[in-house]
Image: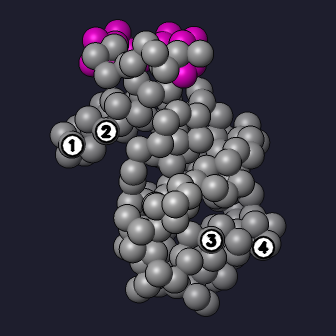
Amino acid sequence: MGALAFWKAVVQDQSNFLERVTSLLRDGGFDYCVIGGVGVNAYAAPVLTEDLNIILAVDQLRAARILLEREFRVAEFEHTLNVYDPGSKLQVQIQRDPGLTAMIARAETHEVLDLELPVAAPLDLIRLKIAAAIESGRSPSKRGKDVLDIGRLVARFRDLKQAVPPESAERVEAVTDPEEAV
């Protein structure tokens, strides 16, 4: 079983939701990149997640929403547009923060879950993960997963360790596997 088939089994994606969303964005000419746990998976050994986080150029959000609403349910939240399909437990979260748009230009195409997707650069991913890990409003389990993702990135790219704030360095070091280092 391939990585995509495995992930689709976990999120019970019976409608090819992931492929349909990414195809609509690609074929629609939208500028986007993958972030979050799936983005980290492009650079490190994969860890399962039930969501796909995307940065989309802010000036394209309205057009993307109109397109996505033709096929899926879209809900707007303070920081995201969430896209759902009844045939899948996968949730696509499109970030609405205009400050993140610059990351799209630094993204590179990588194979993730057997798909070729634009993925944020490692330094951008670690900065986002650090911000999430220290956000007091997030649950402890989500912040713990963020620390794990930071450790996975640091293990793969040792120079990223300097981006980790001193108060978080010990927690990251505890989850960093030195055998993953390149």
Q: Which residue is mark 3?
A: 19
Disc 4 residue type (three-letter): Gly
Task: Report the residue that reaches farthest toward the front.
Answer: 1
Disc 3 residue type (three-letter): Glu
Q: Which residue is mark 4?
A: 28
Contact between labelled residues 1 and 2, with CB atoms less than 8 Å apart? yes
- Dot 2 alpha-carbon crowd within 10 angstroms: few under 14, some 14 to 19, many 20 or more: some
Pinpoint residue 44: horizontal percent, then vertical percent.
Answer: 52, 33
Q: Identify the mark nearer the N-term, 2 or 3.
A: 3
Q: Which residue is mark 1?
A: 141
Q: Is residue 69 above or below residue 60?
A: below
Q: CA distance from mark 1 to mark 4?
A: 36 Å
Q: CA distance from mark 2 to mark 4?
A: 33 Å
- Residue 100's label in the rendered image is none
Camera-side residue of 53 and 80 = 53
In the drawing, does residue 88 fall left or right of residue 147? right
- SS at mark 2 in the image: helix
